Image (spheres, coloured by chain):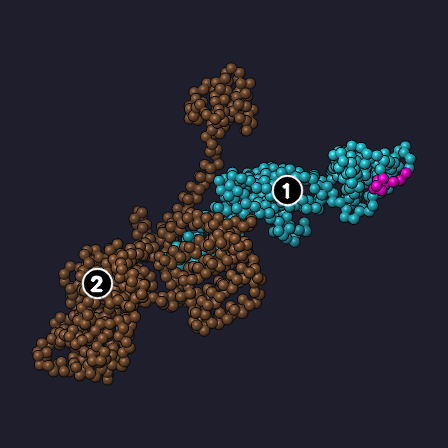
Chain colours: A cyan, B brown
């Protein structure tokens, strides 16, 4: 309500844009047609118009037939440029590669493949996330004739959870800069956004005694180990016995699991007395830390409990649980 | 050159290319702007090029304002104004040069481009020749190339790529240009153009200062082109009449001042023109003279048909229009080479035709008195005296020269007795002074005499160097009679192609001597092309525009109808574009079109086929659904598959199309 009162035009504009974007179909692949490519003159375009007017007035006043020729040739070029500009985007196919999960607040990339099935190069196409506030948000590319090019569009997911990829926009001003041709595209793909890990988290919480075990607090990172076992995917590099690997060509990991009498539980209830998001972001930081240390850890969230384990897939599972809880 | 440029870093390359284009645009201007402006512009461009080449920072904006302020002051000092055409051109050249030092943001680049377009137009103030048009077309392509290049943000695309884009954009833009050029309604100037709009164009002037025409004689530019309907009259009859000069102050001849200001009496005047013989009909294309007179063959009895102008004849047989001719002008006229004019009675003649400047040319007056005292001549009257004067010119050792030197106070005396050489204006002036001293009414007529035929397109070309001055004397009972004293001095000047040649440079002389014929025919071809350019492009005026509409079928065309035609064409092109878009949207591949037809038909029957299903898949579905009934269709579908994918297709698509029509469709 306050926004309406303060700036009714901006508010209406924003509502209109939201309504307009909601109408756009969701699709990971889009081929641009007359219907979804928009065109408007730019400020230099209006300058060009003013120049043409000045030229025609000068030609009339000084009765210069050659001046008329120059003016009208320039006008003809501008008209052609308008069509060239529109044709640069029209007929282009854009395809979004399935995005990897990202951390909130971190810089991430969306890979978009632009395919040109026309027998001529498409110059100067820029891609960006639609509502990006970054100054230099555009990624520029040329798409070769009958070829394709891949661009990485930067975006910064703000909130955790499973979201649609933000609407993307493509733009071109080729060839004369007098017109801006653009399109807005809502990809269907969803991106999983993990909570933003706390920048400087407190140390990991102390372990809880394992049921039935002898209490002997020891951290794995002391370097002592009890034996070796076959390498398993997701084992941290530092537990690999490289000397043995060099000798035999076989990957072997130090096994300290038997030694761990304490279980590390990352508990929502112990993650400080802040609000939910800050706790989640602390938990995310702990998950990353524990994983880096190669420890086994479990995760306790309200309504969800993940038994202690380690490795890449466990980390993902935990982060997903943090993202979606 | 483009390849060498391409080896530089992109920013440097782009800037140097833009500077080269700007230099090319400014090049023709250097002859017209004041020297300080030319020096400044060239220096700034070279400095900017050096900055770009050595990747140095641009100067601070403050310095640009300082230089600009100095340039404005210098413009004021040169022209006493910053408005008007010449001052404006000077300032635009300075601005364009200085703006190149401020290429920081994208907006600055655009300002440079748009200033560049405007500077191109200002070149046309001075010349609209074919050569200028060609040079500016190159400049336009250059600017567009730079502009296109500026909108290729990725990497360092070769300049030739941008040039190609600019080239075919111009090519596609040319039809738009042609349509707009033909149909854009032509108006007169929207507001008064500054008075300096037409300086720099030479030609006859309203007065004749001794020495004026001699400068024209060196000017080889074309004054007018004439197309005769019938055969060309003989050279000695080709006197194109310009201003008639009747008052003389010793140095300068001026036209007779009308004595009835503000009335038309003087114009309609007591011409008393009688013509005889067959008229010569012709069409004149006159180069802009910035003077309100029409050049016609001596003498046009009926008004020349000049579109858009009112015409009137003075009592001295000169045709005037109601405003100066600032544009290439085409008109038709009818002339009689045999005519009589002027009152038969000396009493009806204004006394100015006998007046001489006081205290000048005493020896000429003495000579006149001697001749009148000669009893033999006195008996013969005025004709005998004229003949005697001409005889004196023929036999007295008088010469015709382009370089007579500077005449002093008594121009007639110097010609008759001291120098004995002169250009036609000296001869005519001295002759008229002598006539008046002998009480014979006489006047000087300026205009053009002769010309040459262009063998390529048949136009008769009259150049500024054909400018001529001759005399007219009044004889009782005959009226005004043309006497050309120059013909007596130099018979070659009149009535033949021989023209006095100004000294030429060594190369031209050698070239002319080796292949005089080739040089002549090259020149003829070039001038024919130029003439076509003048006739078609530069002389495309409102009347020709309306005539074109008349040819299309409008009975009484006006500029409103012109606008309608223009709008009609725009609407038609837009509709055609829309139709093309609709056509473009449908499937272009005939094979796919055929398969889609089958697919749609089967879909209507409830067979579930995905859009991407190949023929074999459809065939399977058809067999599954219809069994034996569907066999022919399934077979046909397999043949479709073969047609598309087999290395050698058995049947053509056309044959398959016919087969489909005859297939018994399963139901």
At a point 62% along the width and 44% down the height, the residue shown is: A152
Q: Secondary structure at mark 1?
A: strand
Secondary structure type for disc 2: loop
Q: Position of residue A103 (x, y in %)?
A: 71, 43
Q: With respect to residue B623, does A69 lie above or below? A: below
Left or right? Give the position of A149 relative to A320. left
Could you tell me residue B79's position as x and y percent?
43, 71
> Could you tell me which chain the residue with mark 1 belongs to?
A
Q: Are marks 2 and 1 in contact (CB under 8 Å)?
A: no
- The answer to if B396 sits in the magenta stretch is no
| Disc number placed over residue A110 in the picture, else none | 1
Where is residue B621 drawn, in percent x and y?
55, 21
Closer to the camera in the image, B667 or B538: B538
Q: Quadrant of residue B322?
A: bottom left
Residue at the top extreme of this rendering: B628
Please give the range of residues in magenta. A216-224
| Point 46% across, 39% down: residue | B581
Relative side of B605 to B250, left or right: right
Q: Chain of mark 2?
A: B
Q: Is residue A223 magenta?
A: yes
Q: Residues within 10 Å of mark 1 (few under 14, many from 20)?
A: many
Where residue B338 appears, as percent x and y from the top left, is: 15, 64
Residue annotated with mark 2: B497
- Residue A185 falls in image quadrant: top right
Q: Is residue A90 above or below residue B489?
A: above
Judged by depth in the image, the label closer to the viewer, 2 or 1, is 2
Q: Is residue A235 at least partly visible in the picture?
A: no
In the image, is residue B290 above or below residue A29?
below
Identify the residue at image location x=14%, y=82%: B370
Task: Specify the principal SS of the magenta part.
Answer: loop
Please tell me which residue is depicted at 45% across the width and 30% down the height of the picture.
B590
């Amino acid at each position: 309500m306050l926004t309406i009162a303060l700036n009714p035009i901006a508010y209406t504009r924003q509502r209109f844009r939201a309504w307009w974007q909601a109408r756009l179909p969701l699709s990971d692949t889009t081929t641009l047609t007359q219907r979804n490519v928009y065109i408007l003159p730019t400020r230099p375009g209006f300058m060009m118009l003013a120049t043409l007017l000045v030229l025609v007035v000068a030609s009339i006043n000084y009765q210069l037939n050659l001046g008329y020729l120059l003016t009208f040739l320039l006008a003809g070029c501008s008209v052609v440029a308008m069509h060239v500009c529109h044709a640069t985007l029209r007929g282009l196919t854009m395809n979004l590669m399935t995005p990897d999960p990202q951390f909130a607040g971190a810089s991430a990339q969306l890979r978009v493949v632009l395919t040109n099935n026309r027998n001529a190069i498409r110059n100067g196409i820029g891609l960006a996330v639609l509502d990006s506030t970054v100054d230099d948000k555009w990624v520029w590319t040329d798409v070769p004739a009958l070829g394709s090019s891949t661009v990485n569009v930067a975006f910064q997911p703000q909130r955790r959870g499973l979201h649609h990829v933000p609407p993307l926009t493509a733009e071109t001003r080729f060839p004369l800069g007098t017109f801006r041709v653009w399109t807005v595209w809502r990809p269907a793909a969803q991106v999983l956004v993990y909570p933003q890990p706390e920048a400087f988290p407190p140390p990991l919480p102390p372990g809880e005694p394992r049921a039935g075990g002898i209490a002997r607090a020891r951290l794995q990172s002391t370097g002592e180990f009890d034996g070796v076992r076959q390498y398993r995917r997701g084992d941290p590099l530092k537990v690999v016995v490289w000397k043995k690997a060099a000798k035999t060509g076989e990957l072997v990991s130090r096994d300290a699991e038997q030694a761990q009498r304490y279980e590390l539980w990352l508990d929502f209830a112990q993650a400080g007395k802040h609000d939910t998001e800050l706790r989640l972001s602390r938990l995310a930081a702990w998950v990353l830390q524990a994983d880096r240390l190669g420890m086994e850890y479990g995760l306790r969230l309200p309504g969800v409990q993940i038994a202690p384990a380690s490795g890449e897939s466990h980390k993902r599972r935990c982060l997903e649980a943090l993202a979606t809880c | 050159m483009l390849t060498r440029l391409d080896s530089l870093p992109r920013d440097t390359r782009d800037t140097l290319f833009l500077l080269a284009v700007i230099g090319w645009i400014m090049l023709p201007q250097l002859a017209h702007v004041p020297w300080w402006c030319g020096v400044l512009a060239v220096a700034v461009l070279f400095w900017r090029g050096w900055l770009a080449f050595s990747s140095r920072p641009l100067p601070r904006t403050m310095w640009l304002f300082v230089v600009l302020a100095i340039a404005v002051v210098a413009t004021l000092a040169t022209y006493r104004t910053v408005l008007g055409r010449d001052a404006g051109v000077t300032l635009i050249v300075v601005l364009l040069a200085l703006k190149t030092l401020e290429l920081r943001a994208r907006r600055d680049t655009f300002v440079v481009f748009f200033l560049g377009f405007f500077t191109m137009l200002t070149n046309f103030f001075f010349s609209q020749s074919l050569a200028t048009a060609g040079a500016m077309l190159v400049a336009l392509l250059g600017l567009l190339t730079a502009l296109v290049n500026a909108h290729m943000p990725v990497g360092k695309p070769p300049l030739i790529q941008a040039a190609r884009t600019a080239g075919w954009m111009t090519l596609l833009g040319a039809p738009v240009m042609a349509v707009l050029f033909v149909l854009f309604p032509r108006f007169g100037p929207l507001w008064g153009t500054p008075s300096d709009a037409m300086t720099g164009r030479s030609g006859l002037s309203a007065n004749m200062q001794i020495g004026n025409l001699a400068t024209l004689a060196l000017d080889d530019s074309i004054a007018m082109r004439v197309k005769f309907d019938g055969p060309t009259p003989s050279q000695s009859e080709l006197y194109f009449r310009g201003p008639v000069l009747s008052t003389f102050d010793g140095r300068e001849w001026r036209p007779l001042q009308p004595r009835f200001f503000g009335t038309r009496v003087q114009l309609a005047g007591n011409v008393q023109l009688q013509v005889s013989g067959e008229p010569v009909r012709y069409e004149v294309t006159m180069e802009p003279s910035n003077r309100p007179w029409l050049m016609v063959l001596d003498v046009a009895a009926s008004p020349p048909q000049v579109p858009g102008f009112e015409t009137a004849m003075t009592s001295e047989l000169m045709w005037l229009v109601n405003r100066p001719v600032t544009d290439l002008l085409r008109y038709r006229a009818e002339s009689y080479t045999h005519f009589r004019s002027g009152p038969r009675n000396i009493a009806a003649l204004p006394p100015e035709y006998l007046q001489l400047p006081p205290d000048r040319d005493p020896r000429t007056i003495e000579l006149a008195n001697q001749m009148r005292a000669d009893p033999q001549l006195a008996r013969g009257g005025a004709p005998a005296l004229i003949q005697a004067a001409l005889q004196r010119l023929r036999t007295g050792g008088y010469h015709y020269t382009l370089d007579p030197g500077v005449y002093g106070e008594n121009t007639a005396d110097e010609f008759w007795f001291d120098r004995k050489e002169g250009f036609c204006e000296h001869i005519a002036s001295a002759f008229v002074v002598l006539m008046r001293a002998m009480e014979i009414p006489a006047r000087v007529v300026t205009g053009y005499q002769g010309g040459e035929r262009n063998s390529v397109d048949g136009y008769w070309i009259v150049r500024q160097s054909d400018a001529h001055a001759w005399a007219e004397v009044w004889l009782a009972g005959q009226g005004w009679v043309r006497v050309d004293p120059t013909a007596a001095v130099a018979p070659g000047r009149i009535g033949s192609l021989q023209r006095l040649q100004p000294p030429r440079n060594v190369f031209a002389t050698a070239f002319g001597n080796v292949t005089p014929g080739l040089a002549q025919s090259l020149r003829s071809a070039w001038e024919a092309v130029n003439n076509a350019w003048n006739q078609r492009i530069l002389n495309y005026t409102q009347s020709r525009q309306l005539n074109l509409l008349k040819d299309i079928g409008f009975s009484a065309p006006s500029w409103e109808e012109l606008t309608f035609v223009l709008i009609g064409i725009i609407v038609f092109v837009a509709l055609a574009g829309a139709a093309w878009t609709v056509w473009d949207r449908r499937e272009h591949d005939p094979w796919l079109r055929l398969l889609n037809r089958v697919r749609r038909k089967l879909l209507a029957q409830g067979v579930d086929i995905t859009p991407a299903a190949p023929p074999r898949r459809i065939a399977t579905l058809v067999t599954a659904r219809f069994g034996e009934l569907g066999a022919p269709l399934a077979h046909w579908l397999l043949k479709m598959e073969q047609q598309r994918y087999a290395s050698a297709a058995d049947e053509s698509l056309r044959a398959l199309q016919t087969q489909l029509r005859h297939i018994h469709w399963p139901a």
